[in-house]
Amino acid sequence: MKTSKHTASKTTKQTASRAGATGEQQLAGFIEKFDSKNAALIRSVRKVLRKRLPTANELVYDNYNFFVIGYCSTERPSDCILSIAAGANGVGLSFYYGAALPDPHKLLLGSGSQNRFIRIESAATLMRPEVEGLIAAAIKNAERPLPTSGRGKLVIRSISKKQRPRRKKSE
């Protein structure tokens, strides 16, 4: 029986739910695929962003190329403001509409028509005034503002069965 990509990811999500795994447990499992340094970095960056954006929904994608936690004003991916994007080579902070952000310090990387990112060496990177300025501008420029009260939800959006390695190959 053939299934669409959407159905396959839905099935994966349902299977995990039936097995009793909560969203937080699933998320922990995705992060455990990384080497200890990147796993710790993902957890610490998430903790800072969760505190900074308490009303944002966290949309989680464990896709082929990257593991992503998007911080969104709704449950729609197009309402993503910024995200943690991680691969075997490290962790970045991606600004969904980064091409439109003011970047006087020339921190943003990428050349696409929409998305820009910065590399994250530690959670302290998020505290740098110029990075905080980018985060504040992204929040301010969001088409759909973050809710002013409440707590955002953790939503596991998709899990790809086939993925690039989350750890660098041993040399």
Image (cartoon, grey):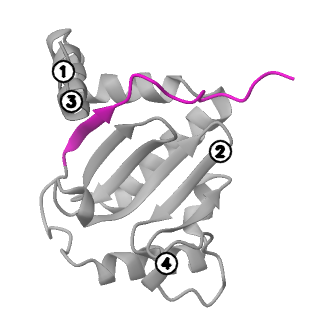
Instruction: Choose the circle earlier in sequence order: 3 or 2.
Output: 3
Asked if residue 117 lies left or right of residue 101, the reply is: right
Gap in angstroms between the C-alphas marked 1 and 2 = 29 Å
Q: Which mark is residue 134?
A: 4
Q: Separation of disc 4 and disc 1 at Cα?
A: 37 Å
Q: What secondary structure predominates along the stretch shown in magenta?
A: loop
Counting residues from the start of the chain, the first of labels 1 and 2 encountered is: 1
Camera-near label (1 vs 3) is 3
Disc 4 residue type (three-letter):
Leu
| Relative depth, front residue between 56 and 116 | 116
Front-most of 42 and 88?
Answer: 88
**Callout 2 amino acid:** Gly
Q: Nearer the viewer, mark 3 or mark 4?
A: 3
Q: Which residues are magenta?
A: 153-171
Dot 4 and dot 1 residues touching (CB under 8 Å): no
Q: Counting other residues with Cα less than 10 Å from the Cα at mark 4, is it few (<14), some (14-19), or many (20 or more)?
A: many
| Residue 113: x %, y % from top left | 47, 76
Q: Can you say which quadrant of the picture contains the C terminus? A: top right
- Is-magenta flag for residue 81? no
The disc label shown at residue 11, or none? 1
Residue reaching furthest to the right: 171
Q: Whole-Å distance between the Cαs marked 3 and 2? A: 31 Å
Q: Which quadrant is home to the N terminus?
A: top left
Please name the residue that numbered disc 3 is placed on: 4
Looking at the image, is 3 positioned above or below residue 101? Answer: above
For numbered disc 3, what is the local secondary structure?
loop
- Residue 159, by quadrant, is top left
Disc number lying in front (1 or 2): 1
